[in-house]
Image (tube, coloured by chain):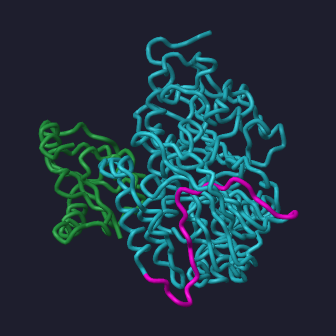
Chain colours: A cyan, B green
Amino acid sequence: METNVESGPGTPERPLKVAIVGSGPSGFYAAEALFSSGVAVEVDMLERLPTPYGLVRYGVAPDHAKLKSVTGVFATIARDPRFRLFGNVELGHDIDIERLGAIYHAVIVATGATADRQLGIEGEHLAGVHAASDFVGWYNGRPDVADLAFDLSQPTAVVVGQGNVALDVCRILARPVHELGHTDIAEHALRALKASRIQDIHLVGRRGPAQAKFTSRELRELSTLEGWQLRVDPSDLALAAACQEELADPAHIHGAKNVALLQACAAAPERAGHRRIHLHFHAAPVALHGAGRLAEVELEAQALRGPAKAQQAIGTGRRRRIQAGLLLRSVGYRGTALPGLPFDPRLGVIPNEQGRVLDGGKVSRGAYVTGWIKRGPTGIIGTNRTDSIETVSTLLADRTTFELDRPGRTALAAHLDAAGRRVVSFEHWLCIEREEARRGAMLQKTAEKFTTIAAMLAATELAS
Amino acid sequence: MTHVVIENCRDCRFTDCVASCPVSCFHVDELRAYIDPQTCIDCGACIPACPVHAIVEEFDLSDEQRHWLDVNAEAARRYPAIRGKLPALPTAAAKRASLGY
C-alpha cells in the first residue's frame, strides 16, 4: 500500500479527508479542531437523524435556553466551506464502517452514549416505570420517543438518580407550565404537563449529599421553583468523617455548596399550599410493586462504608415503601456497540488510547473516537471540546500512516445516491430549523419541533 | 448571570479553561484571562479545568469579589478572544504554590 512517509495527506493538493459520525458537541468540536489545525482538511459529518446537534437538541432541557444557544457555535463550524453534513445517514444501516474507512483517511466516531442503565430490580417492567432519558427525549420532541405516554395523573412520582439529568426531569415535572410555554418544549409534553396532578416528587439516590453528582447551580434552580418546596430530612445530612474529608477537597467544587443549600432547605419550615420535592439520600430502590402498573416503590436504607472518595453504599436491610404511580430512572447512560467496531461492554465505550481505537489491544488504523462513546457519559458540553482536541491531535500525529489517496466526499455521495438514500444537507437543516421557528412563533414559542422524520424531510423541500 | 475570572489567575494564566469553553468566551492580556459575560453560557465547564480555582460563578461571588464582574466585562471588550490553550506564564508555578494548590 502506498503511504507518504514524509507527512501523509493534508496538503492543499491532497487534503486530509475525515468522516465524523455523529453531530453532537463532540463531533462538532472535532470538526473545529481539524479546521484550526493548519492542515488542509475536508470534513464530512454523518448524522442518523435529519437534524444535527445531538443531545444539545434532544438532551438539554428546554428551559435552559442559554445552554442550548451553543448551537450557534456549531452552526458557525458547519458553515465552514470545508464542511459538509450528511444528515439522515446511519452508520451500519446506510453505510458500514469498512466502506467508510475505505473512502476516508480517518473516521471519528462521536455517536455518544444514549442507552439507559436499568436498575436491575424486580418490577422494572411495570407500566409507569420509565428511563429518564426517554422522558427527556419525549419533552424535547425526539422522534423515536415522541409517541410515548407518561402518566402524570399520579399524585406521586419517584425519580431515581443523583445527577443533573435526575434534577432536570424533576424540574420539568415541577416547573409551572407558564414558564415552559414559550420554550421549544414539544407541544405534546406541554399539554401533558398542563394536566399534571403530581403533588409530590421523591428524588432517591443511594449515596449521600456530599457525593451527589448534580451541580449546585441545578440544585439551586430546583430549590427556587414557584409553588414548590424542597424537603430534606436533617438526619440525612449528617456527615461522617469520610464525607467531611471529601467536602474539604477543593477539587470537589459542588459538594460543600450542595450541602449548605440542603441544610438551608432542611431547616426551613414547611410552607402551606406548596407541592413538595423530597430529597432522599442513602436510599436505593430494591423492588417495584404493582399489578401490571407501578403502585409502590420499595426502598432500602444505605450506609456508606470505606475511606473518603472510595465510599460504597451498602444496604442496611431497613426497608420502607413509597406509594407512587410513576418512576423515572436516571442512573447513567451507556454507549451502544456499533457494527464493525470493538466495544467494551463493561464500560459501555469503544476501547481507545487518547482517541485512537484499539481492537483487542491493537491499533485499529484510521479509526478514532471522541465524546461519550470514548470516555463514558461524564462531563458537560465543554468537556467534549477538550476531549475532541485530544482525539484530533492523536489523529494528526498518525497522519504519516494514512494512505495518500482517498476519494472522500464524492464517493460517499455516490454510495448514498446509489443506495437511494435521501441525504439532508446543512442547508436542508436550516430549512427545517426555519420552519420549526415559524411553527413556534404561531404558538408564542421559540420553536415547535417536528417529531417525525417524514415531517422533517418534508420541511427540507420548503423555501430552499 | 455569568462566570468570572478572579485574582488567582494573575501571573498564572494556565488557560486550561479555554480548551473546555464551548463558546470561546475567554480573552487574555499579558497577565491573566477574562470571561466575556455576553458570550458565556454559564455551563461551568471551566471551573474544574482551572488548576488555581480562579473561576467563580457569579452567584457564588463574595461581596469583596463582586468588582470582578466589571473587570471581566470591560477587559473582554479590550483584549482579544482566544480559542486554544496557551503556555502558562513563567511565573505560574510560583503563583500556584503561593495559592496553596
Above/below status of B95 relative to A56: above
**In the figure, is residue A294 to the left or right of B17?**
right
The image shows residue A380 at horizontal and vertical percentages of 48, 51
Frontmost residue, A428 versus B86 = B86
Report whether residue A428 is seen: no
The image shows residue A362 at horizontal and vertical percentages of 59, 16
| Quadrant including the C terminus of chain A | bottom right
Instruction: Name the residue at 42% across, 68% down.
Output: A262
Above/below status of A38 relative to A242: above
**In the figure, is residue B93 to the left or right of A358?**
left
Instruction: Name the residue at 50% across, 48% down.
Output: A80
Report whether residue A112 is seen: yes
Whether residue B74 is in magenta: the answer is no
Above/below status of B56 relative to A275: above
Whether residue A287 is in magenta: the answer is yes
Instruction: Name the residue at 54% across, 47% down.
Output: A313
**In the figure, is residue A117 to the left or right of A204?**
right
The image shows residue B19 at horizontal and vertical percentages of 37, 44
Q: What range of the chain is rendered magenta? A: A269-292
